[in-house]
Amino acid sequence: MITFNGVTKRYADGTVAVDDLNLEVPTGEMTVFVGPSGCGKTTSLRMINRMIDPSGGQLLLDGVDVTTIDPPTLRRGIGYVIQQAGLFPHRKIVDNVATVPLLLGWDRKKARARAMELLERVGLDPKMAGRYPFQLSGGQQQRVGVARALAADPPVLLMDEPFSAVDPIVRTSLQDELLRLQAELNKTIVFVTHDIDEAMKLGDRVAVLRVGGRLAQLDDPATLLARPADDFVREFLGRDRGIRRLSFISDEGVGLRTDLLVPASTDVASARASGEEWLAVVDERERPLGWVATGHLPASGTLADLELAPYGTYVSGRDSLRGALDATLLSPSGNAVAVDGSGRAVGVATRRSLNEALTEVAAGAGSPAKSPGVTGSGVTGTGASAKGPDVTATDAGPSVKDAGDTSGAGGAGATTGGTGGTAGPGGVDG
């Protein structure tokens, strides 16, 4: 656990970067520091590994005052990931990752073996181990940075805006990769960002800091969105915080209709006789293919002969209410197809059932806590998964033959690593 007890940072010119900060970072959780420029979030993070020393108060790491620990020793036990790559340009990738273990006295063979293990864990091809940083893309370099920060298996990981320099698509994949790694490793992570959406997606708890380095609110994302402490927090969260809140509420309250699912072999006469305005067509494996409007059917044939309208899916029991709502927007039917983990259709969430679920949330009946597996901010387009086990949406092609994948593909990504201040890559004193 990391504990800030009245921590203050005041510079010689009188500038107060952090003012009487009191908070705890629980062991095994990710706590995100977020706020506008000048709120002291990076300064607070850098005081943990003594890149900056506090002017007052106490900063404890598992009950030990960090100012009593030799800085290089402290940093070698803390993973450190910063903006952009920060890799040693003259070293091969495997040697970049092995930096901290070698400084800790590991023999070269063991350190390299650990580096190869971590490169695979962060999703990099082992063939890249022998390359130099300039031979990798920005996203690949960031994965190397994370591998390097984790090389000595530190219990604490500090991440200072590691995804700020990449494009939105890569950024999403890097966030997904971090969540996957955290689910496996359970590190104590302090993550700094200025992006509230990133904070909500990643954080077990989010600390909102105001200019001047004072804590405005510390809560889990769902509580933060539902009950902002004051006007500053409310304004910082933005006007769409109600929609964001749905990302942390399970879809379990959404009723599903199985009678709206019909096989592609269904003849048009039977489809017309159903009396339903829209039907969701599925293939022989019960995977969704698209929607058909029963009011515009030909005189004969089967549904397999028709061009089908696009559809959106979400994973029932795993995705959020926001995911179910977003999936409805991908189809002219205004309904969402619920699928299981294998992509098999299990029912249809209609506008009526979603409206009932939203009414319960508005009345306070929805759970404010992050449900297991309910993470991220909703559906992404055409077979792309927002993150690990998050919402998947499919925008199917116009016909049965062109139907899209319902399951999507989990993104792969990583983070940046490197140097900062007086410390070298991965928190190593350089």
Image: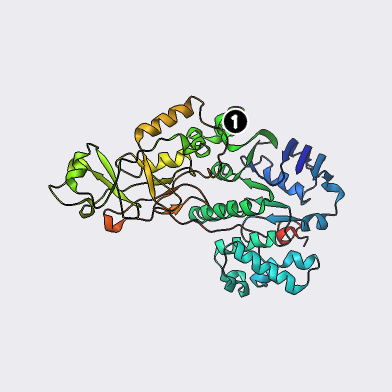
For image coordinates 42% across by 40% down, the residue present is 324
Q: Nearer the viewer, residue 107 or 39?
A: 107
- Quarter that holds the C terminus: bottom right
- Quarter that holds the N terminus: top right
Dividing the picture into quarters, in which one does residue 352 lie?
top left
Give percent across and percent down for residue 243: 47, 35
Q: Is residue 237 visible?
A: yes
Farthest right residue in view: 68
* Dot 1: element: helix
Which residue type does callout 1 highlight?
Answer: Phe
Q: Is residue 54 visible?
A: no
Q: Nearer the viewer, residue 426 or 129?
A: 129
Which residue has dot 1 on it? 232
Q: How many marks?
A: 1
On the picture, is 302 further left or further right than 126?
left
256 to 312, vertically: above or below = above
On the picture, is 269 further left or further right than 394?
left
